[in-house]
Every structure is written in structure tokens, then in C-alpha cells.
Amino acid sequence: MTEITSLSLFELIKSIKEKKISSYEAAKSFVDRSEKSKKLNAYVTENFENCLKISKKFDSNPNFDLKLPGIPIAVKDLFCTNEVRTTAGSNILNNFVPNYESTVTQNIWNEGGILLGKLNCDEFAMGSSNETSFFGNVQNPIAKDLVPGGSSGGSSSALAANLTPVTIGTDTGGSIRQPASFTGTVGLKPTYGSCSRYGIVAFASSLDQAGPMSKDVKDSSILLEVISSFDKKDSTSIDFKRNNYSSELTRNIKGIKIGIPKEYRVDGMSDEIENLWKKGIEYAKDCGAEIIDISLPHTSYALPTYYIVAPAEASSNLARYDGVKYGLRSSGESLIDMYEKTRSEGFGEEVKRRIMIGTYVLSSGYYDAYYLKAQKVRQLIKQDFDQAYNKVDAILTPSTPSSAFKIGEKSNDPVSMYLNDIFTVPVNLAGLPGISIPAGTDKNNYPLGLQIIGKPFDEQTVLNIAYSMEEKINYKNNITDWWME
Amino acid sequence: MTIDLKTVKHISKLARISLEEKKAEKLANDMNSIFEFIEKLNELKTENVEPLTSLAKTTLRFREDKITSKNIREKILKNSPEKNDDFFVVPKVVE
């Protein structure tokens, strides 16, 4: 039999339901492999003993009707977990132990999932390489000293290294799709309002969405079905009829219209990415899709818009870290002095940079010139998509402008780091669903991903196209376990 | 436009983040290169565009104003860096 840790979620559920393996055996396999994989630095907090205990409890009275029967799952450390430390990759939350549970993780535990541990991420999800985490770099299992992407870098690394069968991340500007692309895995950002934001450490509230990350498309459909729910505790959660994504998954996409936006052919795009995209178009045609050229004229304004809207919202959200109610406190002579020292010592460089930008664009005299302007351009970007969707059902683009880069390569140049998200950011600004699937490799054999963007609330079409193309692409990660102890 | 050191210090006051002189200089440089990149938005005429303030088409929901979690004072206080019985403690505010 194949090793338990290399099974897909679907296969793992099947094996547990057929009693070929127990929940404890599954948990033990992932715990053992995680114990031997410390060099990846994927975990911030381990929940291994608890996980084994709960899996035994599951086995003594199993409920096989659940969607995730006794399945161990590690999650990004941005989700608040009751009585388990939640850091958001920040020093300021180093000792924070929530007394409540995020809705998304609660949905997972309700369906039989068991928490394996909390996974490393960029500090407050601000980053594209996992290098801004207070808890250090994460290694990409694809090759040594390669970034796993970010901000859900611990999630993508743990998933690609088979330390967890599936995982969840959050995506504000590409933080699920870019790390999925960098590690040869699948990552889905659902429509804004599909998954509850309750209990997720907030970064930019009008952009943040939780979503599944998995080894294949089917697994993402299973996990999306579990985590997507209407939630009164999130004021922007949307009450719409959710599909049974996994049972409605089909490879029949004949006649589906897929748009190719010419503006994504950006200046200086490498031949590798260009060729990958062309190959993707051929695969989509092979699957029976109709390819249509479209235009999204405001694409090049998406990143500048994002770098006003996201820091503005972040500066407001992060005002709560004041050293009083929870988190780090530095000593100061007065209340204000205490605030200033706490925030200076508690936040890392990138977070401070974004708070400063956000504070600036919201400050008196600059609001209209920056924040209001950005909100207007955001409207234009959304209208581009609305118009495109009169002609097509989905859009196909590359996920990222390059493959994974080396640790340290871009950390001194914020703008070049930001450019990583050029293809993913517009999707967040317009609140659309988007998935990244592995589609090939570059000259170094590092994975490259393709992105499929859908209409709002049409995750099913996005998943179906991905599922169909995945079969034709037939991508396999080539991982050597070089980090294992 | 450029953001000078004085502006950076003013913003850091507003953001309640203390800054060393050396760090302030680097931050000014970083912010300038980011704003250079942001200025691209000025190419667009947006006088007649409605700002997008929310992706949700519906208005915010109302809920009853009633307490849903009870007796959590101790749990809430547990995460506080400094407390005194049932209170959060902060440095002296009034002389």
C-alpha cells in the first residue's frame, strides 16, 4: 500500500471509511513525518499529542457519515483556535491563546477534522515569501533555500511535503494561489463572502478570504464544501445557495467559454510563463472549452490600487494591538509611550511599513488623493470583469509572473516583492473566486501554476475547469525528501 | 511628490509606532519607492466613477442587541499582559 501521508484527502477518507486504516494510524503517520521535517519550519505550534488523543477517541466511536471522518489537518496560524496559541506570525501575538474558534476551523472540526498544528505564515499575512514571519523562513520542499511563497507559506510547504493531507490558507492578494503555484499544489480563493471571516486575524477586511489548499482539485472541492457557510458572526458573509462542490464535480466542460485577457501579457513576461499559458489554452481546448480573447483594460492599475486599499484597511485593523488587552506589552513611561514601544517592538518591518502607508493615505488632506481614488479605480477594475463575464464563463491566466525564488532574493526591495501578486490581486479587488493549479515547470524544474478565475459564487465552474484540465496536464511533483532527519 | 523625514515622523506618531532615526530614513526611502509606484493611478480620470466601498450588494444586516457569551471575564482577562482583579492595568494616565 502507498504511504498514508502521500494519499490524497479523498483516498484517505475512503481508507478510513472502509476501515483499512484508523484515524489514529493516519494521525500518527502525519505526526511522525512532521516530527522529521522540522527543517522546513512549517509549524509554529504543534498540536501533535492532542491530535493523537482525539484520533483515538474518534476510533473508539467512529462516525463515518462525517465529511472529514477523523482526518488530521494542520491550518494556517491566522485562524483563531480555541485554547491553542494563535500568532499570525507576529511577535505581538506570540503568547496569544484565543478563547474562541474561527468559524472556518469550527466547520472542519464539526465534520470530524482534527487539528494537527498551526502553520507558519508571513506576519499578519503581509508578504509573498513567508520571510516576514517572526518565526523565521519556511523552506519550500521543492528545493533547498527556495521560498514556499506567501503569505500561506507554512501551509503550502506542509502540504507539498505531505505533513498534512490538506490545509487552509487565507488570500488577501494572492496568499493562497501564489504559494500553491510555488509548491506544485492546488489553492482556491473563494468568492468574497463565501467563507466566514469570523475568528481570522484581520489584515484587509474587504479583501480577506479563507480557502482550501490541497494536492489535487477534488480535495479542494471536498474541503470547500466543509468550510463555506453563511455566518451571522461575519457581517459580510453572504447567504447564497452553496453547491455540493465535490459531488457536483465533473470533467464535462464542453462548450464552456474561457476568456484570455490580453492585458495579462505583461512587459517582460518570461518565455516560460508565456509558453505555459499557451499550453494551458491548448489543454482547455482539448477539454472542450471555447477560447475567447477578452480585454481587462485596467489590469495594470490593480497593484497600485491594492497597495492603497490593503494598507489602509490594515492600519485600521491593526490599531487594536496596543499592549492592553492581549499580546505583547513593552514598558513605557506613559500610556502613549507604552503604545509606541509595544507596537515598535511587536511588529516587524513589513507590517510597520504597511501601517505607515495606510496611516498616510488615510490622514487628513490625503484621503481623497489616495484612498478615495483607489476605491474609484477598484470600481473600474470590477467593471472590467463584469463586462468580460457577459462574454465568457471563466478566465485563464498564469498564477504568478515567475517560479519560486531564493530566500533573501527579494526581501530588500518591497516593490519587486509586490509584483509577485500582479495576476492574483485583481481577483481579490473584484471579490471573485480563483484557483491555481500546477501546470508545468521552469528550467530549474520548479513548479508553475495556471489560474482560473470565475464569476462570483460560481466556484463550481472554476473547480470543474480545473478538474478537467488537471487530468490533461497530469502534473506530478518530484520531491526528494531532502530535508528529512 | 516625496515623503520627507518630517512627514515620516509625523505619520509614525499618528500610527503610534516609535521610530529610531536610522529606521526612519530607510522607511522614508521605502515609502517613496512605493508611492512612486502608486502614482500611476493619476493617469486615470475618475471624476464620474462611484467609489467601490463594499463588494456585498446587500445592506448590512441588523441583529438584536443582546448578550450571547456569558461569564467569559476570566477567559478574556487571561490574555492580558497586566491585570488587577477584574481590570486591565495601564500606565498612569492622570497626574
Image (spheres, coloured by chain):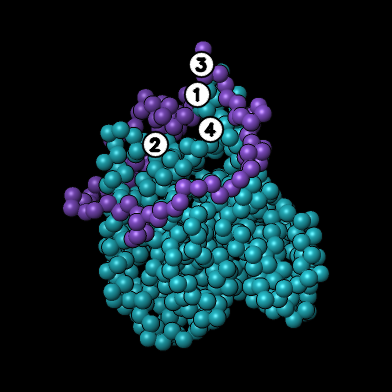
> Residue A336's mark?
1
- Nearer to us of marks 2 and 1 is 1
Of badges 4 and 3, nearer the viewer stands 3
Circle 3 — which element? loop
* Residue A261, image x, y percentages: 33, 69
* Dot 2 and dot 1 within a common chain: yes
Task: Identify residue for label 3.
Answer: B94
Task: Find residue A359 and name its label.
Answer: 2
The reply to whether discs 1 and 3 touch (Cβ–Cβ < 8 Å) is no
Helix, strand or loop status at disc 4: loop
Q: Colour of chain A?
A: cyan
Q: Amino acid at mark 4?
A: Asp
Q: Is residue A459 left or right of residue A78?
A: left
Tell me the kind of residue under disc 3. Val
Nearer the observer: mark 2 or 4; the answer is 4
Q: Is residue A151 visible?
A: no
